[in-house]
């Protein structure tokens, strides 16, 4: 049994999870990366880290059900137990939700339920709030909804720019997400 990571973009969280899982010798390893986006930078990281990767393009399917059924085939063949969303910018549909009930997790760069959707760091910075942060949660049918597992606040300081604040959020993500996943796969959550 093992872990699949879904990502659409750069993949810094993917990389931190893979590195931590190897360092700590998790009982379940990251055995595949799935992306919906051709040319996503995360594919280069998967190559470098020697993690098998699959590009499943939604454009090649008539609807979401067919798209997710194709993904499901790959996941079943690989005996995947957990789906970890790491910057996967697509809602999970009933096909995957039903098969992986309670075993799909997401990370979001805000203190949910504030600032859902895309560009959450920019949204918080532009508001402007004094504190935003990072949330890890179980996935349901909504956008960035579902039971919250962990949250870490990150203050926006007077002298922060969007870039410095983004770096602070990323640093929290890269330590929090592997820790939460480790607790999930070892049955402590
Ligand atoms: C992360 O900040 C993650 O929290 C966010 O996408 C980024 C992916 O970065 N996810 C969402 O906004 C989900 N709604 P990465 O590709 O470098 O890991």
Image: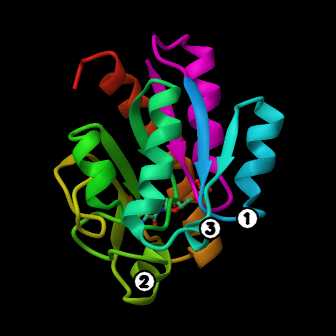
Instruction: Locate the N terminus and report the quarter of the image it occupies.
Output: top left
Whether 180 is among the magenta residues is no
2 and 3 marks in contact (CB < 8 Å): no
Label 1 element class: loop
1 to 55, vertically: above or below = above
Rendered image quadrant of residue 128: bottom left
Label 2 vs label 3, nearer the camera:
2
The residue located at (50%, 58%) in the rendering is 169
Residue at image mark 3? 164
The residue located at (22%, 26%) in the rendering is 189
* Residue 106 % position (x, y): 37, 51
State which tag comes first along the sequence, 1 or 2.
1
Residue at image mark 1? 38
**Residue range corresponding to the magenta coloring:** 1-29
In whole angstroms, how far apart are the C-alphas of marks 1 and 2? Answer: 27 Å
Q: Indicate which disc residue 123 carries.
A: 2
State which tag comes first along the sequence, 2 or 3.
2
Label 1 vs label 2, nearer the camera:
1
Q: Nearer the viewer, residue 39 or 119?
A: 39
Label 3 element class: helix
Q: Nearer the viewer, residue 174 or 105?
A: 105
> Is the shortest distance between ligand 1 and the CB of mark 1 under 8 Å?
no
Q: How many marks can you see?
A: 3
């Amino acid at each position: 049994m093992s872990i699949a990571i879904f990502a659409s973009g750069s993949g810094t969280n993917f990389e931190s999870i893979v590195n931590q899982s190897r360092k700590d010798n998790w009982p379940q390893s990251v055995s595949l990366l799935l992306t919906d986006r051709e040319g996503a930078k995360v594919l280069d990281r998967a190559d470098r880290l020697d993690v098998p990767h699959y590009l499943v393009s939604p454009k090649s399917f008539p609807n979401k059900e067919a798209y997710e059924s194709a993904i499901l085939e790959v996941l079943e063949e690989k005996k995947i137990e957990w789906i970890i969303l790491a910057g996967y910018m697509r809602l999970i549909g009933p096909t995957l939700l039903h098969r992986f009930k309670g075993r799909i997790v997401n990370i979001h760069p805000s203190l949910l339920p504030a600032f859902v959707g895309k560009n959450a760091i920019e949204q918080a910075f532009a508001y402007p709030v004094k504190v935003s942060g990072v949330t890890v949660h179980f996935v349901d049918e909504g956008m960035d909804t579902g039971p919250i597992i962990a949250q870490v606040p990150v203050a926006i300081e007077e002298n922060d720019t969007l870039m410095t604040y983004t770096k602070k959020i990323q640093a929290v993500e890269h330590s929090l997400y592997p820790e939460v996943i480790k607790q999930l796969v070892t049955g402590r959550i």
